[in-house]
Image (cartoon, rainbow, N blue to C red):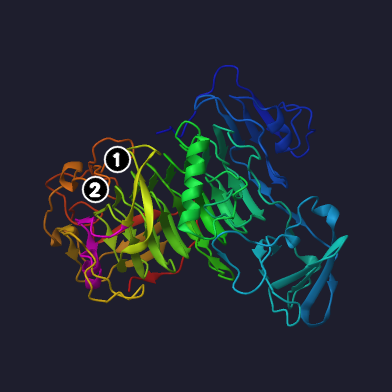
């Protein structure tokens, strides 16, 4: 996979951006004033270094680099706070009765795009019986909610009406003089996103990026995020703080075409999307291979990271993702901290995910995907949702602590050395046939219904006895018409071995240095297990493919959750090797930009 570091050729330049600069210069002595101006002249190998300040602009890079070693890099100057915002400050509010304030905003502020006039819409979007717009209002950085009507406007809500020359906005902010606060409104539909596809090898590093009026991003349409790659290859998005996108934070997703949002919310519609992508050249030569690393992503009302077809051969590692789709004023079928379609040979590792509607959602064609060493808790629906996949995919060394750990409508999963603190749900899907690919490729090899049964559960820790029942192929609840709670849906025997039911309930605690897990007992309390390998897992039933690392090498679990060496002598169930010191472990280290969560007990 790509390296996080890039080496530049000798002719590379550093183009400086300072708010006091002018946009026809760019040297350290005479810097540019805007990031966009520097982007227009940057060539492969150049670095755009942005200095202290808030930059209210949308960057549309006209070109990318030529290779991994000849990138165009956009970076915040080391040690300086650099923010890019898609909002503008609005002042001159007039006091109305009952704590309501009113302002008229000239359309000159918005230009060609007025978020207060732009309805959120698209395939698989549910408006819950009322309109929603891509606009947002922020007071001192805190987002207010949109109201469906002006009458009875509640506290900390806003409402707007768009006329020919002005947009009028009302907010209810009781007990405060709004003109003494910083009030901002969404203006830009995205912050860092190329309008053209094929803008390859860009690095974006070290910025704070907030306030984007993003549109709903279904898998069958162009997926625009606060920052996004737009069907390109080889981006590195790292060490940024990304927040307050109306829909999506980071997009690794699909290009736009004339068929956007015409799928009728159907599996057949997405089949057509895949076929058109293949005709366009969907493969690792033109798309994917992105790295999303050590970002803090929060307060997005659809997804933290999304990607349909464009998130192939990627690494999504060591990110903190929280508060995703928690307002729940609208709904749909695309909401999660990480929501990917076709994450072929993609690594999702070391992420801390909490307070999201769902943690990780892999929807269609998770093949060669590896999900490892993630900490998930306080998520509303489930920590991991595997939908309509045939594998092989590997889920190992994760800590799942939400009420539901796993909801699976998939075949071909290997679940190894995880801690399942919540429930497991597994069932078949007889209404949709979904594809699988040739090994380490985007080329289709077949399509089939999900019949369940072809999963492996080995060396896991379970907190609930019912979770083991679900792992054996029996469902806990009725999820579709005609299912019986005792019905065994498996057409063939599961691979289920050396799992351990814990006699206690782990407790997650946050302290100043990070998150710690109180286990109640050390790992020597349960027996040594056989090591799990590519050979021991065998082949998936449908695709007849082996379980491997994302680079195609044989699967060997040589390290545990904390990076300790795993051997035949210390291999026990769960994410850690056998040790006398596993009764209490640090499971995630706090860093700048992380947000504390409430103490949670696994129930």
> Which residue is drawn at the image coordinates 63% and 47% (left, top)?
258
Tell me which numbered mark, 2 or 1, is placed earlier along the sequence. Answer: 2
- The correct choice, above or below, for 555 with respect to 125 in the image is above
The span shown in magenta is 450-473
Real-space Cα separation, disc 2 to disc 1, in angstroms? 15 Å
Q: Which mark is residue 334?
A: none
Element class at badge 1? loop
Of residues 35 and 80, the one nearer the viewer is 35
Mark 1 nearby-residue class (10 Å; few <14, some 14–19, many ≥20): many
- The correct choice, above or below, for 2 with respect to 480 in the image is above
Whether residues under marks 2 and 1 lie with C-beta atoms below 8 angstroms apart, the answer is no
At which x and y percent is residue 377? 39, 64
Asked if residue 244 lies left or right of residue 435, the reply is right
Asked if residue 166 lies left or right of residue 52, the reply is right
At which x and y percent is residue 565? 22, 43
At which x and y percent is residue 333? 50, 63
Asked if residue 519 lies left or right of residue 54, the reply is left
- The correct choice, above or below, for 101 with respect to 21 in the image is below
Q: Which residue is mark 2?
A: 540
Would you say residue 366 sits in the magenta stretch?
Answer: no
At which x and y percent is residue 441? 37, 37
Q: Which residue is mark 1?
A: 549
- The correct choice, above or below, for 411 with respect to 378 in the image is above
Q: Nearer the viewer, mark 2 or mark 1?
A: 2
């Amino acid at each position: 996979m790509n390296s996080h570091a890039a080496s530049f050729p000798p002719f590379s330049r550093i183009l400086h951006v300072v708010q006091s600069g002018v946009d026809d210069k760019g040297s350290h002595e005479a810097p540019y004033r805007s990031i966009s101006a520097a982007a227009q002249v940057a060539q492969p190998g150049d670095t755009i270094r942005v200095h202290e300040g808030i930059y209210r602009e949308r960057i549309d890079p006209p070109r990318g680099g030529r290779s991994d070693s000849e990138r165009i890099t956009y970076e915040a100057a080391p040690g300086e706070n650099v923010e890019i915002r898609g909002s503008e400050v609005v002042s001159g509010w007039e006091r109305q009765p009952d704590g309501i304030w009113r302002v008229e905003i000239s359309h000159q502020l918005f230009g060609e795009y007025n978020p207060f006039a732009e309805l959120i819409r698209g395939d698989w979007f549910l408006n819950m019986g009322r309109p929603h717009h891509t606009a947002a209002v922020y007071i001192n950085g805190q987002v207010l909610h949109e109201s469906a009507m002006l009458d009875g406007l509640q506290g900390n809500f806003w409402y707007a009406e768009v006329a020919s020359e002005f947009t009028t906005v009302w907010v209810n902010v009781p007990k405060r003089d709004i003109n003494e606060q910083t009030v901002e409104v969404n203006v830009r539909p995205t912050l860092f996103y190329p309008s053209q596809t094929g803008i390859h090898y860009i690095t974006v590093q070290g910025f704070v990026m907030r306030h984007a009026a993003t549109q709903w991003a279904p898998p069958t349409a162009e997926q625009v995020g606060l920052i996004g790659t737009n069907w390109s290859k080889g981006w590195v998005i790292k060490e940024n703080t990304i927040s307050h996108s109306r829909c999506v934070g980071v997009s690794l997703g699909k290009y736009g075409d004339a068929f956007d949002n015409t799928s009728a919310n159907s599996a057949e519609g997405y089949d057509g999307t895949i076929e058109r992508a293949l005709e366009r050249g969907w493969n690792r030569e033109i798309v994917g291979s992105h790295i999303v690393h050590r970002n803090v992503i929060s307060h997005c009302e659809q997804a933290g990271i999304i990607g349909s077809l464009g998130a192939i051969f990627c690494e999504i590692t060591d990110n903190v993702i929280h508060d995703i789709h928690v307002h729940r004023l609208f709904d749909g079928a695309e909401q999660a901290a990480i929501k990917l379609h076709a994450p072929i040979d993609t690594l999702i590792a070391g992420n801390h995910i909490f307070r999201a509607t769902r943690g990780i959602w892999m929807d269609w064609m998770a093949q060669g995907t590896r999900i490892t060493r993630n900490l998930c808790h306080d998520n509303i629906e489930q920590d991991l949702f595997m939908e309509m996949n045939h594998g092989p995919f590997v889920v190992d060394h994760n800590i799942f602590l939400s009420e539901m750990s796993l909801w699976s409508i998939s075949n071909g999963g290997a679940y190894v050395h995880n801690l399942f603190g919540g429930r497991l749900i597994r069932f078949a899907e007889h209404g949709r046939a979904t594809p699988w690919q040739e090994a380490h490729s985007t080329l289709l090899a077949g399509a089939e219904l999900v019949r369940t049964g072809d999963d492996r559960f080995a060396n896991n820790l379970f907190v609930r006895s019912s979770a083991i029942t679900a792992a054996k192929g029996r469902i806990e609840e009725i999820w579709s018409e005609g299912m019986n709670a005792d019905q065994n849906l498996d057409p063939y025997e599961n691979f289920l071995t050396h799992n351990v039911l814990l006699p206690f309930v782990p407790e997650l605690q946050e302290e100043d240095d990070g998150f710690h897990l109180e286990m109640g007992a050390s790992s020597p309390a349960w027996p040594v297990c056989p090591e799990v390998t590519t050979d021991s897992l065998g082949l998936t039933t449908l695709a007849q493919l082996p379980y491997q690392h994302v680079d195609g090498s044989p699967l060997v679990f040589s390290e545990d959750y904390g990076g300790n060496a795993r051997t035949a002598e210390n291999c026990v169930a769960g994410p850690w090797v056998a040790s006398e010191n596993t009764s209490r472990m640090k499971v995630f280290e706090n860093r700048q930009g992380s947000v504390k969560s409430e103490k949670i007990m696994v129930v």
